[in-house]
Amino acid sequence: MIAVLERLQARNEWTFIKALPEADPVLAASWWTLLLMRGLLPALFAIAMGLLVGAVQRGEPLAGALGLVGTVFVLMQVLGPAHLAVGANLGSRTAAYLYDRLTMACVEPPGMGHLENPELTNDLTMSRDFDLGISGPPLSTSMDFIASGLVEMVAGLASAAVLAAYAWWAPLLLAGAWLGTHWLLRESGVWKDRETDEVREAQRHADYAYRLAVDPPAAKELRLFGLATWTVERFRGYRRHLFELRWEATRLRQRPVLWSLLLVLFANLVVFASLALAAADGTLGLDRMVTFASAAVSTSMIAFGGLSWALDGAAAPAAAVLRLQDAMRRSGALVIGDAPAAQLPAREVRFRNVRFAYPSTPDTEEPVLQGFDLTIPAGSSLAIVGKNGAGKTTLAKLLCRLYDPTEGSIEIDGIDLRSLDLEAWRNRIAAVFQDFVRFELSLRDNVAPAGAPDEVILSALEQAGATGLADLDTILARGYAGGTDLSGGQWQRIALARALCAVQCGAGLVLLDEPTAQLDVRGEAEIFDRILTATRDVTTILISHRFSTVRHADRICVLEQGRVVELGSHQELMAAKGRYHTMFELQASRFAQDAEGPEGSEGSEGSEGMDYDVLS
Ligand SMILES: Nc1ncnc2c1ncn2[C@@H]1O[C@H](COP(=O)(O)OP(=O)(O)OP(=O)(O)O)[C@@H](O)[C@H]1O
Ligand SMILES: [Mg+2]
């Protein structure tokens, strides 16, 4: 019994039903009350009709019985629409509640492992769009299907209960037969196997093809590479595959249908034959006959209704959302200390023998960082160079504590990063990431998402060479009233201004990951000087492929295979004639060649503007 109960509680449907009162207790209570009332009406109608026929037969006054029949009839007409309205409202509330849960689950964890955890991807994919009407009807609509199914189920059971007044075996036989059809046709109505790898894969492909087609970012490549038809075909193909999987799983199968028919036919024959015999030999009066016969007919409602698929369609994503809550909390959790972080780093930032592999990477693969050891004196600037995939951005993410090292530690003035108050530490950091976010917000909010005085914002914009791009109140996205869009390099200046604004607001550690990659060469040199001035008093870590920016840093660190292979100032590294020197020379010669060529205008910049990757 307990095991059955536990199995029931582990079901998606159970989770969904539990979520309703959590979303809105009053609406949920009303919905269930209306459901129960609607469910009882057919049985009540059968009884009322029996009473009316009895009254007619006996020549008694009809007012009472007619009143009852009338009342039940009116309720049958009225409660349906009321239930529909309450259900739609409850569905919307529940969807909103689940979306709130989902956004919290995504945003709340201090780390970001939960957003990259492949085990959570499927639940996340299902949860993200569940109420948009893409994968099924939105909850406000499917609540009506669920309600109708449940009402019919209750009505069938209540009618069967009325039949018990005729003979104890009749409801068992009839209800049993109709319930049996649910079991026999279990493969026909419900798509139980929707969670298979094949379904998920097809869904993900279809989803991606759809996004490629409708989202603006892919528009350029779609056209340029002539991929329009390909995308449509792909979307169509995978969607068709999905439907085929669904049809295969839910197709009406001949044998179960035959068995269902036979079972239902047999049960009804027995019950109605018995009723007929009893009526014929006078043991069953006409009034009771009317009641029982209509109750026997209503019992069939047990078998009908779109309950299963509607409930399944609503319950699966609801359960996924609620599952994600805990799973994401665990997966994105970080140990959080309470040591104050104000004024840090005052002495140094120290990577001590750091080893790191992304949680999603299999153990068989080499970790991104291994034995990474580096001390960065506070107040100095350090440039990091290395091939694509060397782990430069990863270092920046570790410093922001978006992840923690697998082994070893990062220490700020000798304090393990993990024991610092996380929020306070993040407040100390100003960062421009390689894939920095372009907020569809005003210029003001783009520069100071957490707020800052306008004069600070304006001065940061000036330092980043981003004056005159737009008004502080202009929204940086077309599609909004008065909104505007910027070029890649202009956006990069805004991102820089964001970091410089944070510096002005007191950040002590600046992380710049390819901050000038999209700037024109002249703009880059000019802006970099300004950045150096603006970040003179803080610790700056600069990741770049461009030697024009790298060479100005106090020290340069060459990263290879997760380790520091060279470290020193530009002059020292050039003098050491190691890896840095080779790269630098190679690049310089390439640029010199370019300069000699007829179209070598870029080469006139000399080694400025060279890329590390050209060589590696
Ligand atoms: N979120 C992630 N999950 C799993 N692996 C990742 C993730 N991000 C990066 N990696 C892997 O970690 C390695 C280091 O990536 P990282 O982004 O730190 O390189 P990088 O040095 O910044 O390269 P680039 O010069 O191209 O920006 C790469 O092999 C990359 O595939
Ligand atoms: Mg990177």
Image (tube, rainbow, N blue to C red):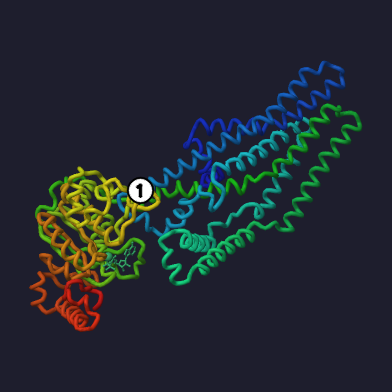
Q: Nearer the viewer, residue 196 or 346?
A: 346
Residue found at x 83% / y 26%: 287
Position above or below: 471 against 276? below
Q: Nearer the viewer, residue 255 or 230?
A: 230
Q: Quadrant of residue 36?
A: top right
Residue under label 1, please give it: 482
Q: Nearer the viewer, residue 587 or 167?
A: 587
Q: Position of residue 325 (x, y in %)?
A: 41, 47
Judged left or right of residue 136, residue 37 is: right
Residue 172 visible: yes
Position above or below: 595 against 398? below
Q: Nearer the viewer, residue 387 or 1?
A: 387
Quadrant where the image shows the N terminus: top right
Q: Residue furthest top?
A: 61
Q: Residue furthest right?
A: 281
Quadrant where the image shows the C terminus: bottom left
Q: Position of residue 343 (x, y in %)?
A: 12, 48
| Amino acid identity at mark 1 | Gly
Residue 351 visible: no
Q: Secondary structure at mark 1?
A: loop
